[in-house]
Amino acid sequence: MTRTRIFSGVKPTGHLTLGNYLGAVRRWAEEDQHRADGVFCVVDLHALTVAHDPARVRRLSRQAATILLAAGLDPDRCALFVQSHVDEHTRLAYLLECTATDGEMRRMIQYKEKAARERARGGSVRLSLLTYPALMAADILAYGTDEVPVGDDQAQHVELTRDLARRFNERYGHVFTVPRATHPPVAARVMDLQDPTAKMGKSQARSAGIVHLLDEPDAVRRKIMRAVTDGGSEVRYDREAHPGVANLLDILSAATGGRERPEELAGQFGSYGALKKDTAEAVVELLCPLRQRHAELSADPAYVDGVLRAGAERARAMARPWVDAAHRAIGLLPPV
Ligand code: TYM
């Protein structure tokens, strides 16, 4: 019996948020690495698809890797590495660009939203923003991945990855495993505290509605206490009518380990203020150990480097046979 293979990644375009943690990272550390063969990646190449500052991407890549370790990823149990250290990702991405169509890429919601935002600012759109999902599919397919633990916002990209895997297999013979996305039962889409109709995103310019994983406890409290709720006062779980309150209930449920569903928690609060207070304390408690561990690990960059070096080596060895097989199947002459 081979073990289930799990792949997932974070993009170093900003400081990691509570959304990243509840939607993805926490499950990698608490569940995925224990029950399966986990491959986790700081996907730095993806951070180059929008205007970027080289020094910042470098800094954020290291910070993201350190946070993943602080969150509990164990280098003895899983492979943790930086995408650009493993050439197999880009080697495979090109073959998947030759499998995908431009129409498929243009239909991606994230492409449409980010391209529109960039154009509205008077900027131009990098070609790599359009081809991004082919690289993401390569990240996943290079490891024979079975499961991809992600937040809701990545569902469409994983669906496209499945289509590309199937199409490639049909055309060129069976090479790829067809992976599936997994999402957490609650908090698969944590919303911005100031605009609960928008996702809490790490690349957002305004940070008042975003809880960053390394925020000081008082900053976390302040942001949650100032969360936008709606006109009413009764605490009910209704994502359509009361998105701000529903978001807080989701966060509280997830932060307290999901023992009580957000719908059940709603009945326990007589006011929005009380809900905010409990949510703030639950998040502070959840993030405290992570912040402490991050501070310790930051003091030892050589340790983090060693983990990333060993992780890349393991990842290369895992990916090489899949990517070589894809090169052969598609008609490329093996090196002589
Ligand atoms: P990224 O860096 O935007 O987010 C990393 C992970 O966090 C999840 N997430 C959220 N979950 C719940 N609520 C939120 N507000 C929230 N914001 C982010 C994301 O769904 C993701 O799981 N394209 C990916 C990175 C990537 C990747 C991959 C992921 C590249 N290649 C291969 C999986 C497999 C991205 O931009 O994630």
Image: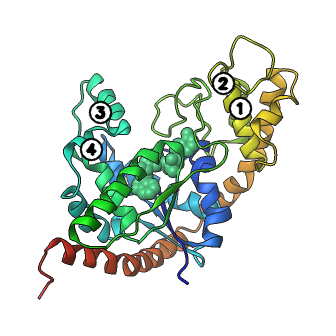
Residue 104 got which mark?
4
* Amino acid of disc 1: Leu
Residue denoted by label 3? 115
Graded by Cα atoms within 10 Å as few (under 14), some (14 to 19) or many (20 or more), the crowding at tag 3 reads many
Q: Which numbered disc flags the more N-terminal residue, 4 or 1?
A: 4
Question: Foreground mark, 4 or 2?
Answer: 4
Give 233 or 204, whichever is nearer the viewer: 233
Disc tally is 4
* Amino acid of disc 2: Gly
Q: Quadrant of residue 42?
A: bottom left
Q: Residue at 68% of width from left, 62% of height from top? A: 30
Q: Are marks 2 and 1 in contact (CB under 8 Å)?
A: yes
The answer for how far apart the CA atoms under marks 1 and 3 are is 30 Å
* Quadrant where the C terminus is found in the figure: bottom left
Q: Is residue 206 left or right of residue 318?
A: right
Q: Is residue 238 left or right of residue 331?
A: right
* Amino acid of disc 3: Ala
Graded by Cα atoms within 10 Å as few (under 14), some (14 to 19) or many (20 or more), the crowding at tag 2 reads many
The answer for how far apart the CA atoms under marks 2 and 1 are is 6 Å
| Place of residue 84 in the rendered image (x, y in percent of width and height, measured from the top left) | 34, 64
Q: Which numbered disc flags the more N-terminal residue, 3 or 2?
A: 3
| Place of residue 120 in the rendered image (x, y in percent of width and height, measured from the top left) | 29, 22
The answer for how far apart the CA atoms under marks 4 and 2 are is 33 Å
| Place of residue 285 in the rendered image (x, y in percent of width and height, measured from the top left) | 78, 47
Regarding mark 2 in the picture, which secondary structure is present there?
A: helix
Q: Residue at 52% of width from left, 43% of height from top? A: 152
The answer for how far apart the CA atoms under marks 4 and 1 are is 35 Å
Q: Which numbered disc flags the more N-terminal residue, 1 or 3?
A: 3
* Amino acid of disc 4: Glu
Q: Quadrant of residue 277?
A: top right
Q: Are marks 4 and 1 in contact (CB under 8 Å)?
A: no
